[in-house]
Image: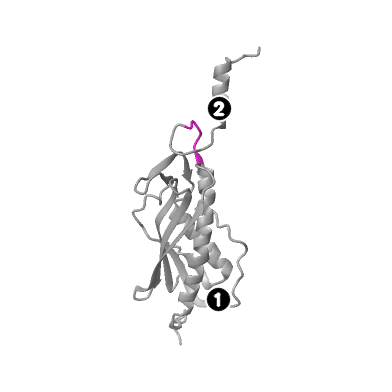
Amino acid sequence: MQIRLPLALSTAVFAAACISVGLGGGEGSPQAQYRLEDLSPKVQPRSTPIDRRLLLSTTPFESIGDTHSMAYSRTGQQREFYQFASWTDRPSARIVQLLSERIEARGMFESVSRLGAGIGGGLILNVGVNEFIHDVRTGTARVEVTAELIERRGRHLVERKRFIASAPVAAENAPSAVAALSRALTTLFDELVPWLERTAEALPPPEPRPPRDGKS
């Protein structure tokens, strides 16, 4: 037997099904998870790598944007979260993963790995997320990251630099914010990676590594 819904009820059901994951709550949409992407075209590799091994690490910052929840702002001081949208990975973890892939594609160092992976390295790049937000007031996605390059031996800070990038958001909803944040992150990488390469190349040659068997 075919069941007919009253016209008002069927219209309401259809409207609820069509609403996108927009700002705040009340959409009635299921939880959607998103992942950042590096949108850069294929990276041109170096002819020879820098004679260094790099370890990547995240720096813990008290940033509301570095959570699994997706943050947006309607005013300069206000921060809110999308109710039905979140990140599959914390932005800092995903940024370090994408940055590692970009550096490896460039062939910049002898090896690139995460700190704590059991692989040695003379340089550490700490990456901290200061801001990662959809700014509704200006219609932009804004990314702000602090990078610290450290000589592991002696824990010497080589250089610290803050990188900021933004991209326009096409609409006030999560998919548009994610696309804009990925574009902004790609632009930020386009500045951060050459800075890292120049800074590492300017360092004096590393001390010779001792032979594994202890013999000279």
**Cα gap from disc 1 to disc 2, whole angstroms:** 56 Å
Q: Is residue 60 magenta?
A: no
Number of numbered discs overlaid on the protein picture: 2
Q: Is residue 185 left or right of residue 162?
A: right
Amino acid type, label 1:
Pro
Residue appearing at x 37%, y 76% in the figure: 153
- Residue furthest to the bottom: 216
Determine whether 151 is above or below 31 in the image: below
Q: Quadrant of the N terminus?
A: top right
Q: Earlier in the sequence, mark 1 or mark 2?
A: 2
**Mark 1: which secondary structure?**
loop
Residue appearing at x 45%, y 54% in the figure: 142
Magenta part of the chain: 27-32
Q: Quadrant of residue 11?
A: top right
Q: Determine the main secondary structure of the stretch shown in magenta.
A: loop
Determine whether 22 is above or below 5 in the image: below
Mark 2 highlights which residue? 15
